[in-house]
Every structure is written in C-alpha cells, then in structure tokens.
C-alpha cells in the first residue's frame, strides 16, 4: 500500500532499527519504547489488522510466533517472560493500520491494560 508507514519501512524506504528480516517478515524496534525491550513484528505484505486475518494466514501467523520466540530467546528475555500484543482498530488503540505485533519485555507488565 503506497501511503502506509509500515509498508514503507518493510520496503526500506523509511529506515528502522531492524532486529530480523526474511522474505515475509520484518522485526524492528519501536520508535517510542514502552518497556526496556519493545519491538514490532510485521508481515511485509500489507494486512490492515488482525481483523483481516483468515484461515489462509495460518502459516504466516505460525512463522510470526516462531520468530518472536527465537528473538526473545536471543535477547535473553524468554526466561522472565514477555508480552505479545496486537491492537485492532480505534478502541483497541491501533494507530498504524498495518498488522503488527508488539513484543514487550524487560520489566513486569501490568494486567489488565488501561
Ligand atoms: P499501535 O498504536 O498501532 O498498536 O502501534 C504502533 C506503534 O508503532 C507504536 O508503538 C509507535 O511507537 C510505533 N511507530 C510509529 N511510527 C514509527 C516509526 O516510524 N518507526 C518505528 N520504529 N516505530 C513507529
Ligand atoms: Zn502497509
């Protein structure tokens, strides 16, 4: 999608602090971190949000979570734990309309979220 911020980051048109990249996914640090470790995982293909996912996206989602598990292990936050969040729409707090998974770690996270 031509005017989508995360499509531009995925295409390398806007720089990001990358953690991981392959043919389908990109992981990069959030510009406004909410925890000592805060990165985002996005599909390179434009998907507006989790509300647009279907059964045919099963392999993509499995890959997303496998990459998150590996990155968290590599970053040394797997033992203490972490949170994976995807916000959907206005009430969900989504500000960028391209599917992304927040991964937050490095401190104890409150529940429920505000
Ligand atoms: P949302 O509010 O949609 O769930 O999350 C969007 C996230 O993208 C926010 O945490 C915000 O800080 C992050 N973000 C917005 N613009 C940029 C950017 O240009 N670069 C990076 N690395 N993160 C961004
Ligand atoms: Zn996009």
Image: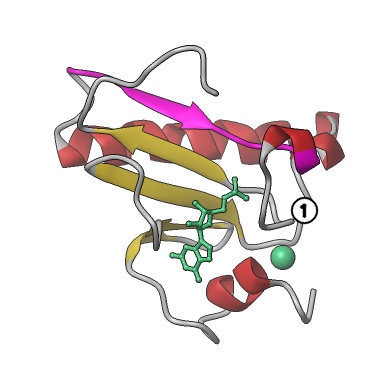
Query: Which residue sits furthest left?
Result: 76
Asked whether 36 falls inside the magenta stretch, the response is no
Compare residues 60 and 83 and report the one nearer the observer: 83
Please give the count of numbered marks on the rendered protein: 1
- Which residue is depicted at the point 54% across and 63% down? 23
Q: Quadrant of residue 96?
A: bottom right
Disc 1 marks which residue? 47
The quarter holding residue 89 reads: top right
**Which stretch did the figure color magenta?**
80-90
Identify the residue at image location x=72%, y=72%.
Answer: 4
Q: Which residue is farthest front?
A: 114
Q: Residue at x 64, y 41 (%)?
A: 60
Residue 35 quadrant: top left
Residue 54 drawn at (x, y percent): 85, 33
Up-down: is 103 above or below 97? Answer: above
Q: How is colour applied across the structure in the image?
A: secondary structure
Residue 86 shown left or right of residue 104 in the figure: right
């Amino acid at each position: 999608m031509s005017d989508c911020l995360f499509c531009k980051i995925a295409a390398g048109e806007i720089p990001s602090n990358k953690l991981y990249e392959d043919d389908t996914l990109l992981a990069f640090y959030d510009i406004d971190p909410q925890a000592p470790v805060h990165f985002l995982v996005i599909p390179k293909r434009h998907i507006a949000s989790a509300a647009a996912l279907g059964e045919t996206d099963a392999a993509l989602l499995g890959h997303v979570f496998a990459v998150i598990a590996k990155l968290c292990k590599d970053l040394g936050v797997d033992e203490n734990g972490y949170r994976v969040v995807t916000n959907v729409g206005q009430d969900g707090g989504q500000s960028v309309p391209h599917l992304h998974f927040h991964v937050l770690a490095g401190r104890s996270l409150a529940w429920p979220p505000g």
